[in-house]
Image (spheres, grey):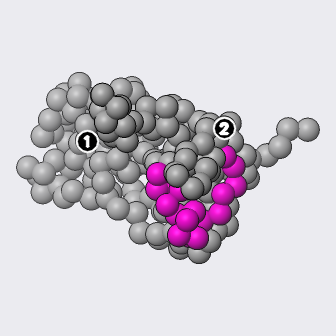
């Protein structure tokens, strides 16, 4: 029985598995806003012991080994600066983020897919300039027709976003959970209230 408890605790430390650490670059900005740069608590503690990060804030909870006890980090900062990528990967997620998770035809939120503005059947290519987020209803309505044939219009023309633009866009969509110790680092450049 004692061995079962120990094995279960090691596999699923339920009290500790929900304590991610916000990872900041050496300039104290998050590595990414959307998705938010988070590490599991185990990776954060490992990075502390490998002297790759400094702890900025901690949770109340601790973890123990036979010889050490440490509070779980809630915010860590990398000791070495990681240069942000300039090129934005053309992914479904980044496309939806560029289009603010809205259908570019009707503006609705929710179940999104993507649509080729110039249909592939008519020579359209899969690129930032020809693909937009679309709800299923609008995507089916447009089908392989041109915008004019379908009687539809785009909310804004599709284009390739810049890396900084996409990072700033991501800040507008915070994750479902934000720990109190993270707030100052997520919105550090926001205008202060007087």
Q: Nearer the viewer, residue 90 or 32?
A: 32
Q: Earlier in the sequence, mark 2 or mark 1?
A: 2
Q: Observer-nearest residue: 93 or 41?
A: 41
Look at the image and give the residue range highlighted in magenta: 42-58
Provide residue 76's location: percent of width, then percent of height.
Answer: 62, 57
Horizontal arrangement in the rendering, residue 147 relative to residue 14 (left or right) = left
Residue located at (91% from left, 38% from top): 194
Q: Position of residue 133 (x, y in %)?
A: 32, 40
Q: Please give left or right for residue 108 compared with residue 165 in the image.
A: left
| Magenta segment includes 52 | yes
Residue 172, numbered label: none
Crowding at dot 1, Cα within 10 Å, few <14 / some 14-19 / many 20+, comes out as: some
Residue 42, placed above or below residue 109: below
- Indicate the secondary structure of the residue bearing disc 1: strand
34 lies above or below 87:
above
Badge 2 local density, few (<14 within 10 Å), some, or many (20+)? few
- For this view, does 49 lie left or right of residue 187? left
Residue matched to label 2: 60
For residue 114, the mark is 1
Q: Which residue is drawn at 52% across and 63% down?
A: 47
Which label sits in the foreground, 2 or 1? 2
Q: Is mark 2 on a helix, strand or loop?
A: strand
Coordinates of residue 187 in the picture (x, y in percent): 69, 47
- Identified at 66% across, 57% down, the residue is 55
Q: Is residue 191 above or below residue 77?
A: above
Does residue 116 appear in the picture of this structure? yes
Residue 155, by quadrant, is top left
Q: Which residue is nearer to you in this view: 3 or 101?
A: 3
Q: Residue 153: image x %, image y %?
A: 34, 36
Residue displayed at 19% across by 28% down? 141
């Amino acid at each position: 029985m004692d061995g079962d408890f120990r094995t279960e605790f090691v596999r699923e430390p339920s009290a500790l598995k929900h304590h991610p650490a916000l990872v900041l670059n050496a300039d104290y900005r998050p590595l990414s806003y959307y998705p938010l740069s988070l590490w599991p608590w185990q990776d954060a503690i490992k990075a502390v012991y490998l002297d790759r990060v400094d702890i900025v804030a901690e949770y109340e909870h601790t973890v123990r080994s036979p010889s050490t006890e440490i509070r779980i980090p809630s915010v860590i900062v990398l000791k070495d600066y990681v240069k942000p990528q300039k090129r934005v990967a053309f992914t479904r997620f980044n496309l939806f983020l560029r289009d603010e998770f809205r259908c570019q035809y009707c503006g609705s939120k929710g179940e999104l897919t993507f649509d080729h503005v110039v249909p592939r059947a008519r020579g359209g290519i899969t690129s930032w300039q020809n693909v937009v987020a679309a709800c299923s209803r609008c995507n089916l309505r447009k089908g392989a027709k041109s915008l004019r044939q379908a009687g539809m219009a785009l909310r804004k023309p599709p284009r390739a976003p810049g890396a900084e633009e996409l990072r700033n866009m991501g800040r507008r969509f915070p994750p479902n959970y934000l720990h109190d110790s993270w707030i100052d680092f997520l919105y550090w450049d926001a205008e202060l209230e007087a």
